[in-house]
Amino acid sequence: MLRAQPLCILTALAALVAAAPSDSADPVRYTLSPDPAVSTDGLRAAIAPIFDSGEMGDTRALIVMRNGRIIAERYAPGYGPDTKLPSWSVAKTVTAVLVGILVSDGRLALDAPAPVPAWSRPGDPRGAITLRHLLTMSAGLDHIETGEPVARADTNRMLFTRGAQDMAAYAESKPLAHAPGSAFTYSTPTSVILADIVTRSLTDSTDPEARRAAMTTFLDQRLKVPLGLTSLTPEFDAHGTMIGGSFVHMTARDYARFGEFLRNQGRADGRQILSERWVAFMRRPSAHEPAYGGHVWLNRESEHDELFADQGPSSLFACVGHQGQYVLISPAQGLTVVRLGISTTEQRVPLRKALGRLVNLFPGT
């Protein structure tokens, strides 16, 4: 997940255009529905600063669902329920779900060596990396997520410059910086490796079109259609690998549906789409970072200040993306909260506090 780093101008412009206001956006702007757990006035007062306070950045959409029902929905002018908005690192959780489906199918194994051909030569220490290591960001690969100069960061190199044609090959080519399983290093390239593993488990073809088609079909049949995520739109690199760490687009309502699916332990419309055991794995604190599970953030005390451990329940977990994309999931409260927009690193500090106050309105904390 990028954190307030300059982006490639063309890609940044493309992302902004994809999320730009449209005159044809749905006219629904702000709706509140009664909920016995919280007063309408209290809910309105908690939501107002998230949109109206300049210190939190530009909020474009916010949805609050409780026990499967939307009780608050608000959009900035020019945005609406039909507006697709970028995921940034929320895409990582989508990728983890796809991995989990294949593990349940018996086509991948969590604790077996990750099936990456570049690591399979005898004596290559990367051959010890497992899916568990990749999912918990403890693979040990020498990936630099952010930093100065910005051109040195592997995430930017992979997404926008030398690695952009074949992102997985770039990510997989890196040597180890730590022994697999010995340290936590948050890494967007790691999620692209997982997307590549998923793709290669679906097709042996190296043709980009065949790879895109295999992943698109799998995504449609096993996630998009069963969950009703009609707006879900992934992006692919030139090699046909889904950019599973950064570039997925959905409407706010579909992000909320995805959050509800995880809140309901992998069930949607009464069907078990993803194993409960896999969701439990995703929510379990990893060995070297108590605030991170399997490609989700956890509401735990940590030096990585991504959520609000002093306010919400410790059982809360979240998909979190660059510039302040949040899908907050609190099973104890029957709650899913989606906030989408643009906020700087500094603006995300008061934004997180405001989201924590919103969550804290509900019983079950």
Image (cartoon, rainbow, N blue to C red):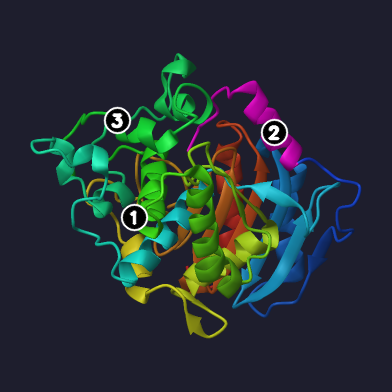
Q: Which residue lies furthest to the left in this view?
A: 123
Residue 20 lies in the magenta stretch = no
Give the residue drawn at x 53%, y 67%: 223
* Residue type marked 1: Gly
Q: Is residue 1 visible?
A: yes
- Which of 232 and 117 lies nearest the eye of the viewer? 117
Give the residue drawn at x 90%, y 58%: 27
Q: Which is closer to the viewer, label 1 or label 3?
A: 3
Indicate the secondary structure of the residue bearing disc 1: loop
Indicate the secondary structure of the residue bearing disc 3: loop
Q: Which residue lies furthest to the bottom in this view?
A: 270
For residue 138, above or below residue 11: below
Residue 351 coordinates in the image, percent (x, y): 61, 44
Residue 108 coordinates in the image, percent (x, y): 28, 62
Q: Is residue 137 left or right of residue 222?
A: left
Neighbour tally class for label 3: few under 14, some 14-19, many 20 plus, Cα within 10 Å: few
* Residue type marked 2: Ala
Image disc number at residue 14: 2
Instruction: Name the N-terminal-most of marks 1 and 3.
Output: 3
For residue 219, above or below residue 326: below
Q: In this view, does 175 lie to the left or right of 31?
A: left
Gap between marks 3 and 2, in whole Å?
28 Å
Q: Which is closer to the viewer, label 2 or label 1?
A: 2
Neighbour tally class for label 2: few under 14, some 14-19, many 20 plus, Cα within 10 Å: few
* Residue type marked 3: Ser
Q: From which residue to which does the magenta span run?
A: 1-19
Q: Is residue 105 left or right of residue 68?
A: left
Indicate the secondary structure of the residue bearing disc 2: helix
Q: Name the residue under label 1.
A: 293
Q: Name the residue under label 3.
A: 173
Q: Is residue 267 left or right of residue 99?
A: right
- Which of 96 and 43 lies nearest the eye of the viewer? 96
